[in-house]
Image (cartoon, rainbow, N blue to C red):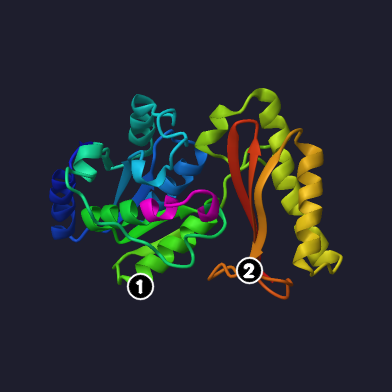
Amino acid sequence: MKIARSPQLLQKLVRGLKLKGRTVGLVPTMGALHHGHLSLINKSLGQNDATIVSIFVNPSQFGPGEDYLRYPRPFARDKELCRAAGVDILFAPTIKAMYPRGYLTFIQVENMSDILCGSFRPGHFRGVATVVAKLFNIASPDRAYFGQKDYQQLRVIERMVKDLNFLVKIVPCPIVREPSGLAVSSRNAYLSREEKTSSSAISKALQQASYLIKYRGLKNTGKIINKLKELIRSGIPGARIDYIDIRDIDNLEKLSSVEGPAAILCAVWVGKTRLIDNIILKS
């Protein structure tokens, strides 16, 4: 496994792969790798001749008072996980390499970035879109892999790729869950044992909402959301809910009634840890 610390070196390595006719998969991460990341890596390994994993804790997607400084950075462990998985190139640039002095260019995906998580984290998706666009330009991947746990992020990136004509195929990958149902996340490391146990109430509530829609005919989104709030608050002592919402699965427009495919999305504070999750209703 090769390690690239600069965009220039990664571009050189990718050019060599492309000259040999190799296909390239990219798995963008902020490190603190877990089973969810490894599922993306394995998907890429199965679909491409070479796989690149990027590890970069992107400062432009963190707002004031967020957890940028304390975000876990176990690079030695992450490096060994990538090596053991069979990753070809690990891209781990410095902040200076990605945002050199005088950097001025940012990307904003309108309408889809200031709702849901974006309404609570102003500028977050501007930072996400910018760093992902940079990674696409640096790594020139044929495919890029994103987990569906960050559903809004996935849709924002897909829209950016479409609107800006990037020659990369976005491959959505299913949410990986712990045995309790809790969606795997790097931020789960912040949870105490008791908080981790109670946090499973989020996925259970989403499953219950899906059941009520599919088998009990509940369609009104306001009633569904109220039921979800009740289930989460009864299952997680002191839970603070940023949002629970039901949206169109493609453009993330708000729905008043569930008449077809829909995404139920939520962000919940468990103690000092903000967790996101979702469930997609196909029909």
Let me know if residue 200 is in the magenta part: no
Q: Nearer the viewer, mark 2 or mark 1?
A: 2
Evaluate whether residue 49 shows in this view. Answer: no
Task: Specify which label sits upstream in the sequence, 2 or 1.
Answer: 1
28 up-or-down from 21: above or below? above
Q: Position of residue 224 (x, y in %)?
A: 78, 60
Q: Quadrant of the C terminus?
A: bottom right
> Residue at the location (27% across, 43% down)?
88
* Tag count: 2
Q: Position of residue 217 (x, y in %)?
A: 84, 69
Asked if residue 183 lies left or right of residue 25, the reply is right
Please, what is the dominant secondary structure of the magenta stretch?
helix
Q: Position of residue 135 (x, y in %)?
A: 28, 52
- Which label belongs to residue 177? none
Q: Badge 2 local density, few (<14 within 10 Å), some, or many (20+)?
A: some
Magenta stretch: give its range. Answer: 118-128
Q: Badge 1 local density, few (<14 within 10 Å), some, or many (20+)?
A: few
* Residue at image mark 2: 254
* Residue at image mark 1: 163
Q: Could you tell me the amino acid type at mark 1?
A: Asp
Asked if residue 149 lies left or right of residue 2, the reply is right
